[in-house]
Amino acid sequence: MRTLHVNLGKNSYDIVFERGLLSDVGKYVKREGRRLAVVTDDNVAKLYADGVVSSLEKAGYRVSLIVLPHGEKTKSFNTLPQIYAKLLQQKITRKDALVALGGGVIGDLTGFVAATYLRGIDFIQIPTSLLAQVDSSIGGKVAVDLTEGKNLVGAFWQPEQVLIDVNALSSLSEEFFTDGMAEVIKYGCIKDKNLFKTLADCGGKKGLLPVIDDVIYRCCDIKREVVEKDEKDKGERMLLNFGHTYGHALEKFYDFEKLSHGMAVSVGMYAITKIAEEKGLTAKGAADEIARVAVMYGLPVEDSAPASEVVKGVVNDKKNLGDKLVAVLLKEIGESYLYPTTAEFFK
Ligand SMILES: NC(=O)c1ccc[n+]([C@@H]2O[C@H](COP(=O)([O-])OP(=O)(O)OC[C@H]3O[C@@H](n4cnc5c(N)ncnc54)[C@H](O)[C@@H]3O)[C@@H](O)[C@H]2O)c1
Ligand SMILES: [Zn+2]
């Protein structure tokens, strides 16, 4: 077992890493409140809900299970009333806690419910997708989507614990594994050239699996460090948006249908680095290195969408004020910085 401590004053918590933890969760959860509501999706429920629920029951908790349909549509503002209603029926009080068992959709949604139900109760993250294990379960950004756009209603609400079982990735589809790899590559790009080199040396998923525990741990440690410096996303934490400004615009350009988040971020990391190289803002060769590694893990780096059209979406991104935006650039692989500019940057 390994742990990382996320130091956020009274909102501090541990991230616990242990293979096989999913069938033994009761051992890791130590709290006074006796009731727990486990929130999950139908895919994850089939595989892991029984083990998690029975282990928590054995540890003495009264456990209820809320199973939602899988997919981003579930992370909607409209899903909230039915969850609040179930928690009330199950008499979940402010002493009790929610358990988010699943990918980023379940983590973000359950976290938002935890932040708002009875003015806020505790929640535990048990991330089961690669993206959730390296990214969304840590840092306390929780949200739901509106019809007008993704993540438009949310909060900063830190979990009480994050419990990571890397074994869960063995049932994750190739598609979602690949998707999560974009964030893993991102961490290497922005903070750790050794991590990036490991990814390159592994040559792809098959080579990576023997060292994946260390890679996930390292990604979590990078996210921990960034979040500790800037919990509320006003400076350093923006570095985590590397490749995301153009990536989000590209996802939107295709109405979230053609490219997954990871694919769009991969294209975005390559695009911004290529442009920055041309402007002399990034060391030469970085974009090609990103492309080489992204392709090894099955991610695209180019897309046929015309940049001039995609960029229109950059201007409307909620993180940008009007035409102004803060671009995340690499000095070189492993070192990133914020560069205030405008959407013109991409043209
Ligand atoms: N809060 C944050 O900081 C943050 C950061 C990045 C992304 N996100 C959010 O995360 C969401 C995407 O997360 P995601 O990619 O995990 O999507 P997801 O939660 O939809 O999970 C992907 C798919 O994999 C399935 N799945 C998950 N774990 C599995 C397992 N172990 N075995 C088999 N199937 C499994 C799920 O049922 C789902 O169909 C988005 O809504 C995004 O906005 C949040
Ligand atoms: Zn992302």
Image: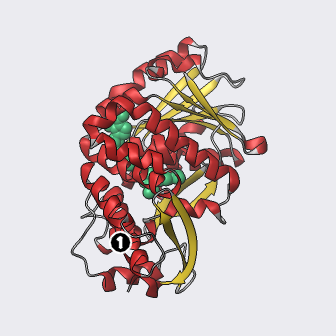
- Quadrant (top left, top right, bottom left, bottom right) of the N terminus: top right
- The amino acid beneath tag 1 is Ala
Image coordinates for residue 195, horizontal then vertical, percent: 45, 45
Q: How many marks?
A: 1
Residue extending furthest toward the left: 304
Image coordinates for residue 171, horizontal then vertical, percent: 30, 31
Residue extending furthest toward the front: 284
In the rendered view, would you say 302 is above or below 62? below
- Quadrant (top left, top right, bottom left, bottom right) of the C terminus: bottom left
Asked which quadrant contains residue 209, the reply is top left
Residue at 63% over, 56% down: 155
Residue at 52% over, 86% down: 323
Q: Nearer the viewer, residue 169 or 184?
A: 184
How many other residues sit within 10 Å of disc 1, few (<14), some (14-19) or many (≥20)?
Answer: many
Residue extending furthest toward the top: 58
Asked which quadrant contains residue 156, the reply is bottom right
In the rendered view, would you say 181 is above or below 49? below
Instruction: Tell me the residue that label 1 is attached to.
Output: 271
- Viewed as shown, does residue 56 lie left or right of 268? right
- Viewed as shown, does residue 305 lie left or right of 278? left
Residue at 54% over, 79% down: 325
| Element on which disc 1 rests | helix
Image coordinates for residue 97, horizontal then vertical, percent: 63, 33
Where does ligand 2 appear, by image quarter?
A: bottom left
Q: Nearer the viewer, residue 171 or 55?
A: 171
Image coordinates for residue 50, horizontal then vertical, percent: 41, 21
Does mark 1 have its CB less than 8 Å from ligand 2?
Answer: no
Is residue 106 visible in the rendered image? The answer is no
